[in-house]
Image: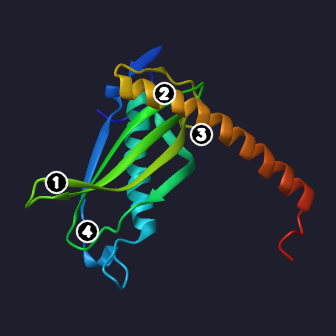
Amino acid sequence: MPFTLEEMSEVVLARTVSESQSERSEIIFPSDANALGNLFGGRLMQYIDLVGAMAASRHARAITVTASMDHLDFLAPVRVGDLLILKSSVNRAYRTSMEVGVKAMVEDVRHNRMRHVSSAYLTYVAVDKDGGRIAVPQVIPETEHQKRRYEDAGRRREMRSGETLRKKEMRAALGDEWHI
C-alpha cells in the first residue's frame, strides 16, 4: 500500500510526551571528524535536527519542518570511535508548532557510563503535503521532569518571540543594502 499523507492525519487533541520520545545512535567515523579527530559541530547539529524531527513527526503524525534551533550547547568533544546517543521529546506544543528538546550523550561501552556532550532546543512546524501549516495535538506532561520542561518551554517561547520581533525590526531598519 503506498504512503499518503492522509493516512497520517488522525484527529487527536493531545498526546503524552512519551509518545513522541525518539532515540538515534551513531558511531563516529573519521569522515565525520575534523583534523583533531573530533566530530564536526555541523554534523552534530544535523544529527540533533534529525532526532528532533523524529519526535516532532511522531507527535504531530505529520511531516514537520525545522523552524529554528536555539540554545545549542557543545559541552564536550565527541571523538572518532565514540558511540553517540541522541534522545529527543516534544516539550510543548502550540497551534502548529512544537518545541523539541534534544540531549546528546557519548556512551562509554566498556565502563557502562554516559557522558553528556550537547543539548539543544528546536522548533518544528507541522505541514500538509502543500507545505501549509496544520494544527498539532497538545502535549500532556506526566512526570515532574516533563512538567518542568513544559513550563520552561513556555518561557523560552516568550524569549524567542521577543528576539524574533527585535530582529525583524532591525532588518527593516537596515534596508536591503545592509551588506554593502
Spatial separation of the CA atoms under disc 1 and disc 2: 28 Å
Frontmost of labels 3 and 2 is: 2
What is the x, y in percent for residue 146? 39, 27
Mark 3 to mark 4 CA distance (whole Å):
34 Å
Q: CA distance from mark 2 to mark 4?
A: 32 Å
Q: Using the rendered image of the protein, determine whether residue 97 is visible from the camera's viewpoint.
A: no
N-terminal-most mark, 1 or 2: 1
Q: Residue 28 — which label?
A: 4
Q: CA distance from mark 1 to mark 3?
A: 42 Å
The residue tagged 3 is: 131
Residue 121 visible (yes or no): yes
Alpha carbon separation for disc pair 3 and 2: 27 Å
Q: Secondary structure at mark 2?
A: helix
Name the residue carrying label 1.
Answer: 113
Dot 1: element? strand
Q: Decide which of tag 2 and tag 4 comes sooner along the chain.
A: 4
Viewer-nearest of discs 1 and 2: 1
Quadrant for the N terminus, please: top left
Residue behind mark 2: 150
Residue 30 vs residue 109, the one in the foreground: 109
Inspect the image, locate mark 2, and give the three-letter code of the amino acid beneath it. Answer: Tyr
Residue 44, horizontal then vertical, whole percent: 39, 62
